[in-house]
Image (cartoon, coloured by chain):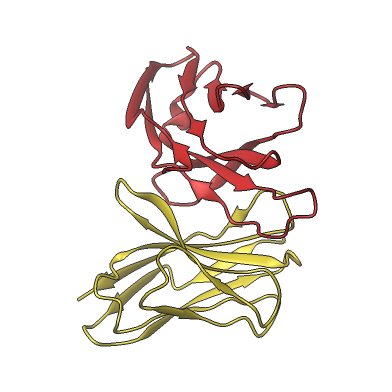
Chain colours: A yellow, B red
Amino acid sequence: DGGITQSPKYLFRKEGQNVTLSCEQNLNHDAMYWYRQDPGQGLRLIYYSQIVNDFQKGDIAEGYSVSREKKESFPLTVTSAQKNPTAFYLCASSIARREAFFGQGTRLTVV
Amino acid sequence: AQKITQTQPGMFVQEKEAVTLDCTYDTSDPSYGLFWYKQPSSGEMIFLIYQGSYDQQNATEGRYSLNFQKARKSANLVISASQLGDSAMYFCAMREGRGRGSTLGRLYFGRGTQLTVWP
């Protein structure tokens, strides 16, 4: 079955530590996105990529980094520069103007 | 300015009744798409319905319909015959087209409406 797989489902980060969230899709979609969700805030765009080896900052890119070396993969690294990383992270993909399909999400907690 | 505004933080509806969730949007682009997603407590985002700015008729998908009023820039979701399983957070979203060949693709989301269906 085609879809988007995010891993891990739960992630704990220590202060000052970088962590990487995985996002893989087998839908052959060109575009991929990372969103952050906080309670009462809706979804905010972190980064997005339209094609391999290219990506753009979204509204809240500070403290995050991404790569797009393969069409299927769009990992997100939460760096130590992100001071408040505790949130729910959602990865999505789409083709052109159609709806975006989402993964199951990763809940990141700072301990 | 907010691209998507959802003014109802919470809504309650009795099972089998219809409910309308409000959404207004802001864009100067003549080409855009409007989407509704459902997010149950598990966190996954489930696509419900899509309306294109050039579509002449309101979109419908089963029990879901979109009341599209272009001049008012509103795209309200109507759920008919509510079920207990409809209890979830609902998000309205928009993608601006910048022409039919647009590749920008990003979705702007509202803050959501928490719908509770009671027996």
| Image quadrant where residue A106 sits | bottom left
Left or right of B28? Residue B108 is left
**B57 relative to A54, above or below:** above
Q: Position of residue B26 (x, y in %)?
A: 52, 37
Q: Position of residue A88 (x, y in %)?
A: 37, 61
For the residue pair A28 and A61, the one nearer the viewer reads as: A61
Q: Position of residue A72 (x, y in %)?
A: 68, 75
| Image quadrant where residue B29 sits | top right
**Badge count:** 0
Q: Residue at x 79, y 48 (%)?
A: B100
For the residue pair B111 and B15, the one nearer the viewer reads as: B111
Q: Residue at x 42, y 36 (%)?
A: B88
**B72 relative to B36, above or below:** above
Left or right of B55? Residue A82 is left
For this orientation, the residue located farthest to the front is B28
For the residue pair B21 and B100, the one nearer the viewer reads as: B100
Q: Residue at x 67, y 65 (%)?
A: A31
Q: Residue at x 44, y 26 (%)?
A: B84
Looking at the rendering, in which quadrant would you find the N terminus of chain B?
Answer: top left
Left or right of B59? Residue A42 is left
Q: Position of residue B96 (x, y in %)?
A: 63, 47
Looking at the rendering, in which quadrant would you find the C terminus of chain B?
Answer: top left
Q: Is residue B2 something one can see in this rendering?
A: yes
Q: Is residue B64 something one can see in this rendering?
A: no
**B53 relative to B67, above or below:** below
